[in-house]
Image (cartoon, rainbow, N blue to C red):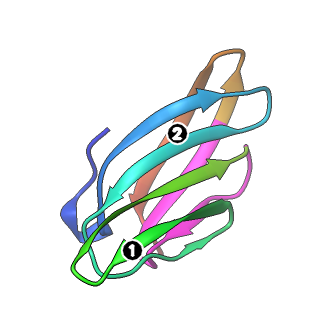
């Protein structure tokens, strides 16, 4: 899924859905990365680029780069409903 450039991420790709988590990867388009509310990590080059992996479960929304809210609304078998909107 494509998100606005202001979120500091390129296209987000879901790589796996388990019983309680959705795993995703995204290219970083900014010079830094922060996540609160789900686990994530990756490398960041000084010129942006790099990538990040996120693993989020159902529940309260995570905040990505202080600008994006990512909520896993529901996980059902191999499908998940995600809600992405501006943080705040």
Res 9 quadrant in image: bottom left
Magenta-span inclusion, residue 44:
no
| Element under disc 2 | strand
Res 8 quadrant in image: bottom left
- Of the numbered discs 2 and 1, the one sitting upstream in the chain is 1
Crowding at mark 1 (Cα within 10 Å: few <14, some 14-19, many 20+)? some
Closest to the observer, 41 or 62: 41
Range drawn in magenta: 58-73
Crowding at mark 2 (Cα within 10 Å: few <14, some 14-19, many 20+)? some
Magenta-span inclusion, residue 59:
yes
Closest to the observer, 44 or 55: 44
Is residue 67 shown left or right of residue 71?
left
Q: Residue at x 72, y 38 (%)?
A: 21
Q: Give residue 44's mark.
A: 1
Q: Residue at x 45, y 69 (%)?
A: 43
- Relative to residue 28, is residue 88 depicted above or below? below
Q: Quadrant of the N terminus?
A: top left
Is residue 42 shown left or right of residue 40?
left
Q: Nearer the viewer, mark 2 or mark 1?
A: 1
Q: Residue at x 72, y 45 (%)?
A: 57
CA–CA distance in space, label 2 to label 1: 25 Å
Q: Position of residue 13 (x, y in %)?
A: 40, 37
| Element under disc 1 | strand
Is residue 63 shown left or right of residue 30?
right
- Relative to residue 84, is residue 42 depicted above or below? below
- Relative to residue 54, is residue 80 depicted above or below? above
Is residue 18 shown left or right of residue 28?
right
Q: Position of residue 42 (x, y in %)?
A: 51, 64
Q: Position of residue 2 (x, y in %)?
A: 26, 44
Q: Position of residue 34 (x, y in %)?
A: 51, 77
Q: Please give the residue where the numbered disc 2 appears in the rendered image.
A: 82
Number of marks: 2
């Amino acid at each position: 899924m494509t998100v606005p450039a202001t979120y500091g991420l390129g296209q987000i790709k879901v790589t796996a859905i388990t019983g309680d988590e959705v795993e995703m990867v995204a290219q970083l388009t900014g010079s830094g990365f922060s996540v609160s509310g789900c686990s994530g990590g990756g490398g960041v080059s000084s010129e942006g680029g790099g990538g990040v992996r996120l693993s989020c479960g159902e529940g309260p929304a995570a905040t990505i780069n202080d600008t994006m809210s990512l909520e896993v609304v529901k996980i059902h078998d191999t499908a998940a409903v995600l809600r992405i909107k501006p943080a705040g």
